[in-house]
């Protein structure tokens, strides 16, 4: 799996250049899913008063904005 700093670098570069990302995400059910997303923001987020590193992105298949925890992103690459 990719180290957090490497994920951050790839995502930040994709945001700057408006590139689509393909992420492999581990859902809460421990099921892997592959998503095609347009990244909007990466950084500290808060959910249920807990801070975490996250990715805010447009999920292209659902055409909805989604949030992904960086520690659950198993793989990330530009399209």
Image (cartoon, helix red, strand yellow):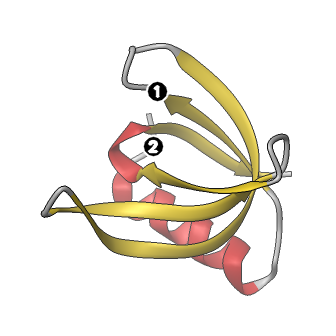
Task: Give the residue drawn at x 55%, y 19%.
Answer: 32
Residue at the location (64% across, 62% down)?
Answer: 57
Work out how far the residue at label 1 is from the one at label 2, CA to CA, in angstroms.
13 Å
Viewed as shown, does residue 72 lie left or right of 77? Answer: left
Which of 41/77 is in front? 41
Residue 22: quarter of image: top right
Q: Secondary structure at mark 2?
A: loop
Q: Is residue 60 left or right of residue 31?
A: right
Residue farthest to the bottom? 16
- Tag 1 near tag 2, CB within 8 Å: no
Vertical side of 73 occupied by 9: above or below? below
Residue at x 39% of width, y 49% of height? 69
The residue located at (46%, 27%) in the rendering is: 26
Give the quadrant of the N terminus.
Answer: top left
Q: Is residue 19 left or right of residue 1?
A: right
Which residue corresponds to mark 1?
Answer: 26
Residue 25 at x, y = what percent? 53, 33
Earlier in the chain: of badge 1 and badge 2, it is 2
Q: Which SS class for mark 1? A: strand
Classify 1 as above or below 31.
below
Q: Residue 31, how many percent across, how many down?
A: 49, 13
| On screen, residue 3 above or below 65 | above
Disc marking residue 2: 2
Q: Nearer the viewer, residue 42 or 8?
A: 42
How crowded pointer 2 is (Cα within 10 Å; few <14, some 14-19, many 20+) is rated as: few
Residue 78 place in picture, x, y as percent: 78, 55
Mark 1 surroundings within 10 Å by alpha-carbon count, few (fewer than 14), some (14 through 19), many (20 or more): some
Instruction: Find residue 34 and report its image quarter.
Output: top right
Classify 6 as above or below 9. above
Q: Nearer the viewer, mark 1 or mark 2?
A: 1
- In this view, the residue farthest toward the left is 49
């Amino acid at each position: 799996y990719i180290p957090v700093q490497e994920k951050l670098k790839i995502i930040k570069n994709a945001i700057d250049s408006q590139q689509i990302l393909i992420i492999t995400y581990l859902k809460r059910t421990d099921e892997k899913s592959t998503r095609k997303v347009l990244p909007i923001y990466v950084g500290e987020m808060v959910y249920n008063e807990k801070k975490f590193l996250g990715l805010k992105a447009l999920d292209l298949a659902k055409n909805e904005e989604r949030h992904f925890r960086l520690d659950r992103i198993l793989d990330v690459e530009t399209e």
